Amino acid sequence: MVYDFSVEIPRENTSAIKLDKREAIFGNQNVIPMWVADMDFATAPFIIERLQKRLQHPILGYTLQDDEYNSSIASWLKKRFGWDIDTSWLGFCPGIVAGLNHAVQAYTNPGDNVLIQTPVYHPFYHAIRQNGRKLLSNPLELVNGKYTINFHDFEEKLKMGVKLFVLCSPHNPVGRVWTKEELTKMANLCLKHDVLIVSDEIHGDLVFNPNKHTPLASIAPDIADKTITFGSASKTFNIAGLATAWIVISNPSLLKKYNLQAQRNGTWHGNVIGFEATKAAYSAQGEEWLSQLLTYLWSNYSLVKDFLKTELPKIKLIELEGTYLLWLDFREYNLSNEELTDLLVSKAGVGFNAGDMFGVEGSGFQRMNIACPAKTVQTVLERLKNTFANL
Ligand SMILES: Cc1ncc(COP(=O)(O)O)c(C=O)c1O
């Protein structure tokens, strides 16, 4: 079946955060929303059909994470990444942000150091600071247009007594898909310094050739033994509103600690709709849908890349390896963050995520979500041209 991602679907009156929070975030309800990381594409029809079928049964009571659900996750991980997991290693969380908070609470104590690589998805900061832990950063370095890891600094930070390293793989917002070599090096340094790793792999399916996502815990048993992996069908299949995510922890004592924390927080069981949607997503049809999605996203990325190169060469686009989030470097304009956002919002009428919300390293950058029909991307590009071409 051929899926059409170019269809424009009005999202008004669905309480979509991307639309309805524009006034609160941008002070302007009319910006074209290119921010929150969900997609303006229809959820795949085979997912909707499965939900419709389930809704024919009139009881929506407490529902088990059943064998079919667990096996659908295990076979997806095997097929896509060659990662063999045992279904007894699986746990549930109502979204990865909740899971990150549980992990920080389960594996560290107030005052402990937790390491992240900035700029990074902002809830990483909250999970550390709002739980009274200390944040250490190993800032990513932009070298010849590509983000890289400063391993010397990484180890220096670990030497300061880090309890937990929270990895974003693939990385939001810089769009890197870490190579197996980079991952192995980070993991081995964590093993050397006895540091646990939380690996947020929510974007693991959204990877463009020739890049390959390697689940960190799949690299070696001793790495798996120290790793808590989070993933979800939510980004891949545009079902983030179902608040359903999975955890893989092969180390029984770490799994027990996690589950205990989830029980303390009262978040150990999931919802029937999220389970059903995940089963439908992680199927052969899901693979076909994803392959077409990636082709469409890549063509949107190419559209932006070619346009900026010819029309707005002062805006530097960081090469996209994974995710549908572009990281745009506006620093050549020498504007403050406030001036830049004001131009984008008030003059261009577009709503991106301001780069500094991901950390100070994001100053002068903006994050643009391209998971929308190409027509919307084209309109945004024209607006950028009208605003920035003569600056
Ligand atoms: C790296 C990363 N982790 C987690 C999330 C959100 O996960 P959830 O909706 O499952 O809480 C996002 C959403 O953008 C993300 O980019």
Image: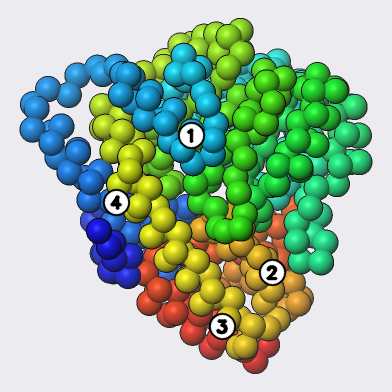
Q: Which of the two labelled residues, at mark 2 and mark 3, occupies the earlier sequence position?
A: 3
Q: CA distance from mark 2 to mark 3?
A: 15 Å
- Give above or below for 356 relative to 236: below
Left or right side of 265 for 281: left
Residue pointed to by mark 3:
307
Image location (x, y in percent) of residue 379 = 43, 80
Amino acid carrying mark 2 in the image: Asp
As rendered, which of 150 and 210 lies closer to the eye? 210
Q: Where is mark 4, residue-wise?
A: 43
| Residue 189 in picture, x, y percent from top left | 83, 30
Residue 31's image quarter? bottom left
Question: Residue beneath label 1, please?
Answer: 77
Farthest residue to the bottom: give it.
390
Which of discs 1 and 2 lies nearer the camera? The answer is 1
Disc 4 from disc 1: Cα separation: 21 Å
Q: Is mark 4 within 8 Å of ligand 1?
A: no
Q: Amino acid at mark 4?
A: Thr
The crowding category of the residue bearing disc 2, from other C-alpha atoms within 10 Å (few below 14, some 14 to 19, many at least 20), is: many
Task: Give the SS element for disc 1.
Answer: helix
Q: Which residue is mark 2?
A: 329
In depth, the one of 153 and 119 nearer the eye is 153
For the C terminus, give its image quadrant. bottom right
Q: Secondary structure at mark 3?
A: helix
